[in-house]
Amino acid sequence: VMRGSDYVRQLDHCGPMSLPIVSLTCFLIGLMLAYMGGAQLQRIGAQSFIADVVTVGVVRELAGLMTGVILAGRIGAAFAAQLATMQSNEEIDALRALGIDPIDYLVLPRLLAMLTVAPLLIAYAALVGVLAGLPPVVGIYGVPAWEYLHKCMSALNWTHLWIGLFKGTMYIVLVALAGCREGLHAGRNAQAVGEATTTAVVKALLWIVVAASASTILFQSLGL
C-alpha cells in the first residue's frame, strides 16, 4: 500500500526542487525565440507580432516539451537509479516476500507525484518563457512593454492552454513510466544500475519526441 510520506517526499523532489533548472531553461528558450522571431518579423515591419509567436510557441509546445526533457534527465534518471539499486540489493524481492506489491509501494507514489506537479510546472514554465521575451522585444525591437503584454494576452486562448497542459502532462508521465520501468527491470549489479539509468533517459526522450510529433499532427488535423 502506498504511504503518504513517500508521496510527499516525491512531490517535493519532483516539484519545488525542479524549479531552478526549469526556470533557467525556459527563460533562455523564451529569450531565444523572441530574439530569432523578432529578427525575421523585423524584415517586414511586423515586430508587434513577436508576442504572438512567443506566446503560442511557448504555451502550446515549448514549455511542456522543455519541461519533459529537463525532467527526463533529472527525475527519470533518479527514479531508474533508485529502483535499480533496490533491485540489485534484492530489496524489491524482499518486498514481494513480505506480500507488498512493488508497484503500489514504489511506483505509485512517484507516478502520482509527477502527475500532481506536472500542470503546475508547465504553467510556471510557460509564464517564465513568455515573460523572457520581454527584454529583447523592448530593448532590441522597440516594442513597448505594455503592447507586448497586451498582445500576449490577446494571442492566448483556452485551446492553446489546454493543449499545452495536456501535452506537457503526457510528456512528464512518460518520463516517470520510463524511469520506473527501467529501474524495476534492471539487473543485479552495479553496471546494471548505470545501464538502467542511461536507458531510462534515452527512452523517455524518445517517447517524448514521438508523443510530441503524434499529438501535434493529431491536433492540427482536428483543426485545433
Image (cartoon, helix red, strand yellow):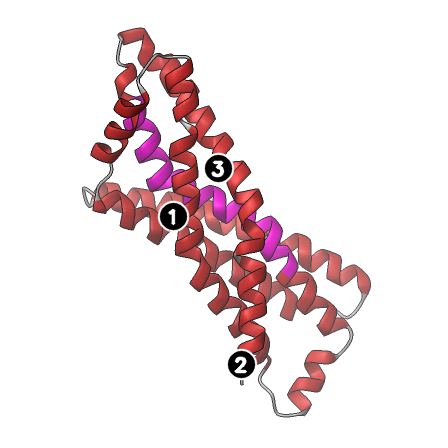
* Nearest to viewer (mark 1 / mark 2): 1
Whether the magenta-drawn stretch holds residue 62 is answered as yes
Q: Which mark is residue 26?
A: 3
Q: In the image, which residues are magenta? A: 50-78
The residue positioned 38% from the left and 43% from the top of the image is 213
Farthest left residue? 223
Classed neighbour count for the residue bearing mark 3: other residues with Cα under 10 Å, few (<14), some (14–19), many (≥20): many
Real-space Cα separation, disc 2 to disc 3, in angstroms: 33 Å
Q: Which mark is residue 2?
A: 2
Are the residues flagged by discs 2 and 3 in contact, CB closer than 8 Å? no
Residue type of the residue flagged with mark 1:
Ala
Q: Which mark is residue 198?
A: none
The residue positioned 45% from the left and 59% from the top of the image is 117
Above or below for 72 versus 156: below
Residue 35 is at least partly visible in this image: yes
Residue at the disc numbered 1? 123
Q: Quadrant of the N terminus?
A: bottom right
Whether the magenta-drawn stretch holds residue 72 is answered as yes
Seen in the image, is 155 located left or right of residue 142? Answer: left
Above or below for 80 versus 97: above
Tell me the SS state at disc 2.
loop
